[in-house]
Image (cartoon, rainbow, N blue to C red):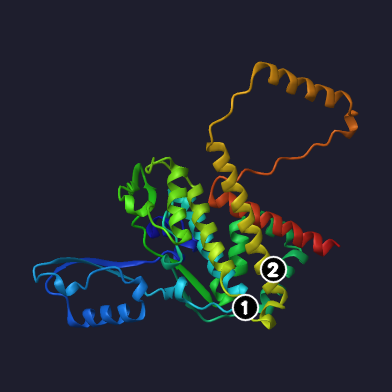
Amino acid sequence: MISALSRAKDTCAKHFVRLQQALVVQGSYPTELLQAWDTFKEENANRSENVRPDVLSSTQLYVLIVMDDAGKDLECTPIASWMERAAAFWQVACAVAVAERATAFEHRDLHLGNILVQRVDKQENLDQIEVYHREQLEKNTMKQVRHMTHIDQILTMYEPRRTGIHATIIDYSLSRMELGKKIIAYDFSDESLFSGQGDTQYDVYRKMRSLVADQWTAHVPMTNVLWLQFVLQRLLASNAPPREETEHESETKAYDLLVHAEQLAHEALENERRQQLPQRRMSTRSKRRSTQRARDALQSTPDKMVPTFAPPPRITSAWTWIEAVVAAAFEEDVEDLNA
């Protein structure tokens, strides 16, 4: 994944965790790691599901995966503002969308524990983010901004050096992607993934199985929309920032954009679900009546009064979803400037 995006010199590559090396080792579990395991269990009793590793023999083999330190998981990281939440979300969403286009990528397990966040040095404060965005609309570069992809536009607004937040995607063990002619995909043979209760995350696995119809090697990019909507809902449902923070204009815009994105994702997934339902057959008599009603409506309406609307683009992937969200937000900004 990283190499595929890096070859394309895509800035989104930095939002996928980088593998340093992988090793196979053998021996008893080290005392230092056992102590770390005990500490984690004490602090996270409800998240500790495995048996203490001291039961394993001295001949046990282990695979060590060494990766970059990308911070702490989003589930356990306090995020102070809507701007920071938006930064974490849009960096992840855009990275998924770009990988989706480059390698037919689907993460298929994108819960908050698989998103790491770390704070980085900020080159501009929050006030300047809004100034920068409006300047791009007001200057002679309007045409250039219009020709930027929607991914570029939103990444420019929420990039790490502007927001002080850097998000990284980890754990591709359930993911699906294509490298050349080779399809890499987990078969989801473990039924326990679909039997969990008590958390909406378990519902996402079941909805995902319905989307792909158990064809796990197939490319169904709507699974990315499903997981990103789940992340959005968690971010929106978490405790709101202090009131003095939310009164800032950039905070309002960040929040509104997240809400709009969640609404579009919900509508797209509902539309996908309806299309999967068995189609009810219409009788010949009903078809004739529908055709006649359509003709009568056209005859009773003067030609000049017949409205012609371009249908909204259908959302079929994370990429098209982000395009729809950002296009609407960009048009609103232009309308505000012209008002």
User: Closest to the observer: 14 or 187?
Assistant: 187
- Give the percent coordinates (x, y) of residue 296: 84, 23
- On the rendered structure, is 297 left or right of 74? right
Q: Is residue 105 visible?
A: no
User: Closest to the observer: 298 or 207?
Assistant: 207
- Tell me the number on the disc at residue 252: none
- On the rendered structure, is 12 left or right of 271? left
- Count residues near mark 1 (Cα–Cα under 10 Å), then give few for <14, some for 14-19, many for 20+: some
Give the residue type that dot 1 points to: Pro
Residue at 42% from the left image edge and 75% from the top image edge: 72
Helix, strand or loop for disc 2: helix
Residue at 14% from the left image edge and 70% from the top image edge: 56
- Tell me the number on the disc at residue 241: 1
Write down the residue under mark 2: 253
Q: In the rendered view, tell whether residue 285 sits above or below residue 189.
A: above
Q: Is residue 78 visible?
A: yes
Give the residue type that dot 2 points to: Lys
Looking at marks 2 and 1 on the same chain, the residue that comes earlier in the sequence is marked by: 1
Residue at 54% from the left image edge and 48% from the top image edge: 317
Whether the residues at callouts 2 and 1 have beta carbons within 8 Å, the answer is: no
- Give the percent coordinates (x, y) of residue 115: 44, 67
- On the rendered structure, is 88 left or right of 82? left
Position of the N terminus, as image quadrant, is bottom left
Q: In the rendered view, tell whether residue 291 sits above or below residue 148.
A: above
Q: Quadrant of residue 149?
A: bottom right
Instruction: Tell us which disc is closer to us: 2 or 1.
Output: 1
Which residue is most to the front? 198
